[in-house]
Image (cartoon, coloured by chain):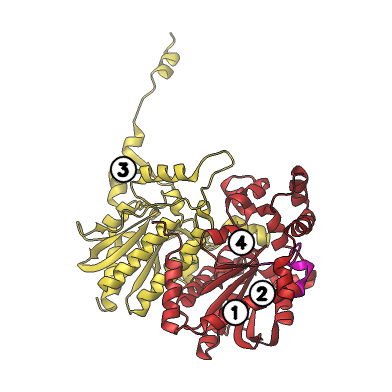
Amino acid sequence: MRDCEVIKHSEEEDLTMAKKTAAKTKTAAKKTAAKPAAKAALTPWEIVQIARHAERPNISDYIELMCEDFVELHGDRLFGDDRGMIGGFATIGGEKVMLIGHRKGRGVEENIEANFGMASPEGYRKAKRLMTLAAKYKLPVVSLVDTPGAYPGSEAEARGQAEAIAHNLEFMSTLKTPIVVVVTGEGGSGGALGIAVGDRILMLQNAVYSVISPEGCASILWRDGTKASLAAEALKITAESLKGLGVIDAIIPEPKGGAHTDKKLAVEAVKKAIVSEIVALKKIGLTELVDARYAKFAAMGRFA
Amino acid sequence: MAWFEKATETPLRVPTEAVWTVCPSCKAYIEKAAWKAADKVCPRCNFHDRMGCRERVALLTDAGSFTELNPEVSFNDPLSFKDPSGEAYRDKAQAAVQKTGVGESVLTGTATIEKIPVVLSIMDFKFLGGSLGSGTGERILLAAEKALELKRPLIIATASGGARMHEGIISLMQMAKTCAAIARLKEAGLPYIALLTDPTTGGVSASYAMVGDLNIAEPKALIGFAGRRVIEQTIKQKLPDDFQTAEYTLSHGFIDHIVQRKELKAFIAKVLRYAGF
């Protein structure tokens, strides 16, 4: 069984391969070289490199490998069609859903079109429009999160990046349909959260989710961008840390060395997790579901 | 000793700082008493200086009507965050509590505005840049729940650089948490007014600041999502001076009204009466 393979592979092998992956980027290479005792678990900074890996499965891979059917729906009906955020009707393991997610491209051309997964206000508004449809047609929402952050450009400001994200937060908190969120790669701050309010928040083993990039934190807080690896540690952005903080519900294991080493296997594990969450959530009454979602977020950061 | 040396030895000493406030914008010398009487608005250039949360409570509410909610909710340190220098976030936050006399970057409470009962949340930029910590989010959520319970309008005055990095992902989650509470309030048909003051950026602009039934702002307040420097680096262009001002935000359709500070209280009371209060 594939799924068993995902979980059962030897941890040591996993680490060795993942370390190799992480070492591909210069900074991570330095870090690895400086720590010859590489038997310890991956450092958060190494996990950041895996989460950002150019060959990591992106939303196109998930659509191709996880969905029996996908009907893309374009446009926010207000301004345009953001290619950094896509969505549409999808069938996953027999479950009809509304799939939305950030889109990172493969290669330069596609990435320019997708703006490297940095969505603009029209992307968040498109997602909101599709989620409205989802509730109307009684379809669960599946949201795949993978973005460095919302696009920080002057046009995005002019069209209300803050307003677009803010309204999604409010809207998703009361949406009367199940919402399953999977952080598949980079969960970049407000740009990630803008489609990440849900009943179940899952995260891939080597994904990261953070209030700010480690580079941003190091340069803003410590005025030294080279301290990014320290910031990655301090910010507690790995799946394991976030599970401990109660921000995510479950961790989806990745193949040896990271999701990019075996996309099919990686996507299969995500599919299995999504389907089982949807099946469970569909059994809950909508009022109870929305109340539980409120309680879930209200409890975040409450340390009595 | 020559006469010119003697002159420099005993300079004329005028204690200017005790008498004058220098307007941070036009640099005019304004008498301290006049500055205070004008609620920190420059009588020459109309610059609206930042206000502390207690000053703003006094500005907006009927005298003696304010009762603080949840003073027991204070900051948390979920990440045990330390700078590379070893300086702990916990100590910085504690210093902010000492400095401002408020337990978090927002002061919440019940009050009346021209006799209309409301629930208020007033942010204070002096508390760690008005950053959105878990205590901030919790206080705002509890204020919104109190407004729902008492069936009163909620007013939040924002003043914040955004999320509080020292609390990591927990800070980010406060954006969703506060918006969820506001959504419930709105579903119950209760008004929510967002008052945006200088500055309102980052995670605060992308959450409760931008979802008011009415979003109102003080003149020239900085309002935006990403920082100017980040945007300039992204687009590799200089941005115009008026970029991300309240006036810019209004002209792009995200603010209902820019209100002079001295008219704020009456303005809020007036719109609440339209809302049936």
Circle 1 sits on which residue? A276
Circle 4 sits on which residue? A239
Q: Nearer the viewer, mark 4 or mark 1?
A: 1
Q: Label 2 is found on which chain of the structure?
A: A
Q: Nearer the viewer, mark 1 or mark 2?
A: 1
Q: Amino acid at mark 3?
A: Lys
Instruction: Tell me whether circle 4 and circle 3 mark residues in contact (CB < 8 Å).
Output: no
Kindly indicate the quadrant of the structure image that contains residue A19. bottom right
Instruction: Tell me whether circle 3 and circle 1 mark residues in contact (CB < 8 Å).
Output: no
Q: Is residue A82 visible?
A: no
Q: What is the span of residues highlighted in magenta in the rendered image?
A: A253-264
Helix, strand or loop at mark 4? helix
Q: Label 1 is found on which chain of the structure?
A: A
Q: Label 4 is found on which chain of the structure?
A: A
Picture coordinates of residue B59 (x, y %)? 28, 57
Q: Amino acid at mark 4?
A: Ala
Q: Nearer the viewer, residue B32 or A278?
A: A278
Circle 2 sits on which residue? A270
Do pointers 2 and 3 mark residues of a single chain? Answer: no
Do pointers 4 and 3 mark residues of a single chain? Answer: no
Picture coordinates of residue A165 (x, y %)? 53, 71
Helix, strand or loop at mark 1? helix
Picture coordinates of residue A21 (x, y %)? 78, 58
Residue drawn at x 62%, y 58% is A238
State the red chain.
A
